Image (spheres, rainbow, N blue to C red):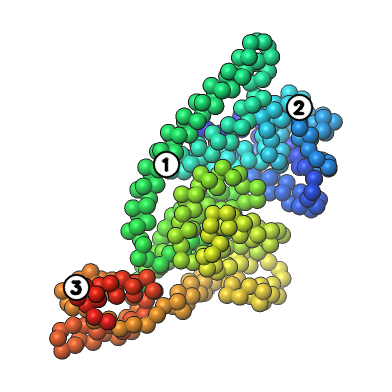
Amino acid sequence: METETLINIENTFRKAVIVGMQIDEQEYEIIQDLNELEALLRTLGIATVGRIIQKRVRPTASHLIGTGKAEEVKTLCDQEGAGLVVIDHVLSGPQIRNLETDIKRQVVDRSGVILDIFARHAKTNAAKTQVKIAQLEYLMPRLVGLWTHFGRQSGSGAGEKQIEMDRRKNRDRIGKLKKRLEEIEGERKVQRRSRRNEIKVAVVGYTNSGKTTLMKGLTSADTDGKDELFATLVASTRPIDPNTRPKILLSDTVGFIRKLPHGLIESFKSTLEEVLDADLLLHVVDVSHTSYNSQMETTTDVLKEIGADHIPTILAFNKMDQVDDPFLPRILKKKYSGSICLSAYSLDDIKRLRNHIFEYFEDKFHEACVLVRPDERDVLSLVHQKCIIIDANYEVEGEIRFHIRAPEIILSKLKKSDSHGGKS
């Protein structure tokens, strides 16, 4: 299934003017949002050639921005040769239509840009299906107003009929796509069940914080991090070190961002189930970014929205090699207990982080002794693959007494096996 994009790049001349609305926010917040919007557009290969900020007590119902400001945007587009206008605010269907009529350019909002980036990066059937659902749900409320001009011209209510037809068609497509996604997710759940005895760490964080590069270092994976937003859409899972017992699995996940469309969070909840299933979250923070505190808050808010705010978390302050302040690591470690400061490109730092994760789980392990008969192969496999064996001795009756350290979930499984013939 091919994913379509909302922005007609061929007609934009790959140049855009961006517009911010300052209503309740401070001006520096609007500037940060517009800087981020520029980065989003760069990911699509579109250059920002101008920006305009409008201060208003409240947005207008017809255009969001004032008609005078819309004329100013049109003039700037004419001067700079821009074929696209991006509003850093949610737009309704009528607002898009009215703005395009006045500005004579394609107009999209921030959500539309993010959806197009997701469409570009969707490679698997699951990701493509998720993006398509999000696109259709994004378009549904915007159908109103997009056909009203047709209805006025015909004078027969044809516009309203077309809107209802399009809505019905979209609802049918969304229903079919969700069924297809359920089938795909059924296969994923089987894979997750096969890993239920493993220790799982999910890498989370703001988009472009260096999660993929960090994962490559921790797992020796053959993936390269990209300096662009939302480079990762599908969770990939690999062991931190195949030789460790028990095995610790690391999963990379989709990045978060401010004003992330709710439909995208809903559509990608299946991908984010890797987060919900984790024993530990590794929250990666780009500490070189001027707004890293705000990015941390955004990630925390999204984790709360998907119900993952109760999972233990290690903060990994990344990109320390790009920070000039020599006292920052000491300040962060004091403020955030258990955190670690590093650069994903430093082998020594990666080793420290790997040991930091190992030590976290070792502190959570419990000691126990268990007796296993030589013919209990499943139990022996569980001990050797999932436990740290401190000592092992053969008893007179031929049983093996293991002195082990293991997570509670593994010990509970061993206790169940004891009740069916083994001893502890």
Q: Is residue 84 visible?
A: no
Q: How far apart are marks 2 and 3 (CA)?
A: 75 Å
N-terminal of the pair, mark 3 or mark 1, is: 1
> Residue at 17% of width from left, 77% of height from top?
374
Q: Residue flagged by tag 3: what amino acid is it?
A: Glu
Residue 36 image point, x, y percent = 68, 49
Residue 181 disc label: 1
N-terminal of the pair, mark 1 or mark 2, is: 2
Residue 162 image point, x, y percent = 57, 19
**Which residue corresponds to mark 2?**
103
Q: Can residue 107 be seen in this view?
A: yes
Q: Residue flagged by tag 2: what amino acid is it?
A: Ile
Residue 344 image point, x, y percent = 55, 65
Under circle 1, the secondary element is helix
Q: Quadrant of the N terminus?
A: top left
Up-down: is 370 above or below 158? Answer: below
Q: Distance between the residues labelled 3 and 1?
A: 40 Å
Residue 376 disc label: 3
